Image (tube, rainbow, N blue to C red):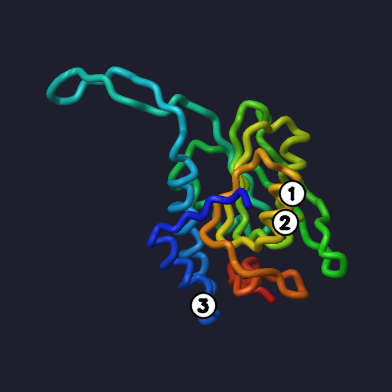
Amino acid sequence: MQVKVIDHPLIQHKLSLLRDKNTGSKDFRELLEEIAMLMAYELTRNLPLEETEIETPVARTRCKVLTGKKLGVVPILRAGLGMVNGVLRLIPAAKVGHVGVYRDPETLKPVEYYCKLPTDVSERDFIVIDPMLATGGSSVATIDMLKRKGAKNIKLMCLVAAPEGVHLVNEQHPDVEIYTASVDERLNDHGYIVPGLGDAGDRIFGTK
């Protein structure tokens, strides 16, 4: 199973609060943003650097800055929206695309309904974000869309993942690295992650 579990204590602590059924929408949204920012820190660990020369108040010196690699963040609607601001707080220059995919309640298969991406897709590295990787259908469909538009370097970031979803993404897109805070036990008969955190979209926006 090709997946990187980010087990930083702060992430694990906040994820436990996020899972709690008594956590209301306001706190859920805030925790989701905080975890997304912390996870993005790990995802960007290998961004390329270059040397530049600057002048401090004391002397001229050479130091390192980002090379200017273009990044894109793609939340899967609607739950992925809850993670965007957290990621942008860390990498504010990233462009944001949006992909709409919903899961048919009968077949559990993804249905695509929206795709709006930056114009220079082929020049960017993309981070696809969604709180949950359940069956994996929505993530695979989103990655399919990005690749059809010319994306070559894609990472997938989710809070909790089911082994079934990880397996499907690995099978369909072995070049896409998966980052998650937890690989949970399994999916139940309704396609929900167990123990999971419920319906992330409903908990973010206070809907049923």
Q: Which residue is mark 2?
A: 136
User: Count the marks: how many?
Assistant: 3
Q: Residue sitting at 60 percent across and 60 percent down?
A: 131
Percent x, y for residue 136? 72, 56
Q: Residue sitting at 68 percent across and 42 percent down?
A: 174
From this view, report whether residue 167 is shown above or below residue 14. above
Q: Residue sitting at 75 percent across and 33 percent down?
A: 149
Q: Which residue is mark 1?
A: 140
**In contact (CB < 8 Å): disc 1 and disc 3:** no
Question: Which amino acid type corresponds to the residue marked 3 in the rendered image?
Answer: Asp
* SS at badge 2: loop
Q: Which residue is mark 3?
A: 20
Q: Nearer the viewer, residue 71 or 138?
A: 138
Q: Nearer the viewer, mark 1 or mark 3?
A: 1
**In contact (CB < 8 Å): disc 2 and disc 1:** yes
Q: Nearer the viewer, residue 134 or 55?
A: 134
- State the CA–CA distance, disc 2 to disc 3: 23 Å
* SS at badge 3: loop
- State the CA–CA distance, disc 1 to disc 3: 28 Å
* SS at badge 1: helix
First of labels 2, 3 by sequence position = 3
Percent x, y for residue 4? 53, 50
Kindly give the residue lying farthest to the bottom in the view shown. Answer: 22
**Image side of residue 114 versus residue 152, left or right:** right
Q: Residue sitting at 70 percent across and 49 percent down?
A: 169
**Image side of residue 127 versus residue 55, left or right:** right
Q: Nearer the viewer, residue 99 or 155?
A: 155
Q: Residues within 10 Å of mark 3 (few under 14, many from 20)?
A: few
Q: Nearer the viewer, mark 2 or mark 3?
A: 2
Percent x, y for residue 162? 65, 63
From this view, report whether residue 96 is shown above or below residue 57. below
